[in-house]
Amino acid sequence: MSARHAAMVALAACLWGLSGTAAQWLMQADGVSPAWLTTVRMAVTGLALLAVLARRQPGTWWALWRHRADRPRFLIFSLVGLAGVQYTYLAAIAASNAAMATLLQYLAPPILVVATAVAIRRRIAAGQALLMAAAGAGTWLLLSGGRPASLLVSPAGLLWGILAAGTLAFYTWTAPPLLARHGTVAVMAWSMLVGAAAVSLAQPPVGGPHPWTWAVVGLVATVAVGGTLLAFGLFLASLSHIAPATAAWLAAVEPVAAGISAHLFLHVPLNAAQMTGGAMVLGAAGWLAALGQRQHGGGRAGDPIMAAAYPAEAEGEAHGHTTDVSQAQNPN
């Protein structure tokens, strides 16, 4: 394992975490709407990835749209999966805070394990059930701070956080065949653009910052460039040089970075019980990912959310072909 590539994964995860804090600042202090921020970050990333794709594959960059059989899955993936998780994650931040939204999103692996067990009619293994129970207990500590009669997150924040986890699980559920056949860059570029168009049509992006200042420009760039495009690029570039299990654990730096930055810059409080609960959620997500990788030969790479429950559709990307076969990554 290259220390440089491990550092790239960790840096990508930190950028994801920091972008959550920047998004919270924009939405809660500058009045930016989740729809506006979702549209901007997806459009910027989609256009940049499409430019890369057109340069690297000038004759095939439009190829995804020629596969009629894949269009329904692609549109469902783009609209419900990718756009869904982008919007619900930002809405969860707006209704609570970056640390809480990011940790609630890590409930996706238990959701995915249950969905997989139902889909293939297989009993959940004892180890998986124990880890899911730990994730549930950790979520209770996170939400209550260890006080049974209290709820330290608004009902809206809790609802959006659970929806973010659910849409992320759905994103993972629908992604593998598309990524295997068309490549990560092509699928993500077009999905980002389709998602941006859909969100802007459903809720016109009129809730931008006002007035624009250099600080606001920096925060928008942190979300749209640093926490989306740059993090995505760093993560993709490292995947062919690092073991999937290692990538899974390093990417779990994201909620840690979100929690620390939210506490330092926005004074978001997290007591000892909540930090313990967050650690339980992350630990359970990581172990669920590791179990899934061992069961299916280690073919999935990415963060714990992306690695849980699914076998790889192809093995080529683990050997460096990052634009041609299945590889999942954090969509935030």
Image (spheres, helix red, strand yellow):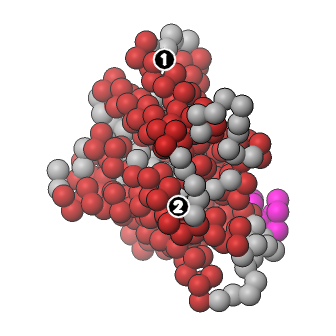
Is residue 203 covered in magenta?
yes
Is residue 37 covered in magenta?
no
Please give left or right for residue 70 compared with residue 236 in the image: right
Which residues are the magenta region? 195-204
Kindly identify the residue that appears in the image at 66 percent across and 39 percent down.
162
Numbered-mark total: 2
Question: Which label was assigned to residue 263?
Answer: 2
Please give left or right for residue 40 compared with residue 136 in the image: right
Q: Is residue 188 above or below residue 275?
A: below
| Magenta segment, prevailing SS (helix, strand or loop) | helix
Is residue 232 visible in the rendered image? The answer is no
Q: Is residue 157 above or below residue 267?
A: above
Kindly identify the residue that appears in the image at 68 percent across and 53 percent down.
96
Amino acid type, callout 1: Ala
Q: Residues within 10 Å of mark 2 (few under 14, many from 20)?
A: some
Question: Which label was assigned to residue 129?
Answer: 1
CB within 8 Å, label 2 to label 1: no
Kindly identify the residue that appears in the image at 30 percent across and 27 percent down.
294
Percent x, y of residue 200: 77, 65
Foreground of the two, 199 or 28: 28
Percent x, y of residue 251: 38, 50
Q: Quadrant of residue 332?
A: bottom right
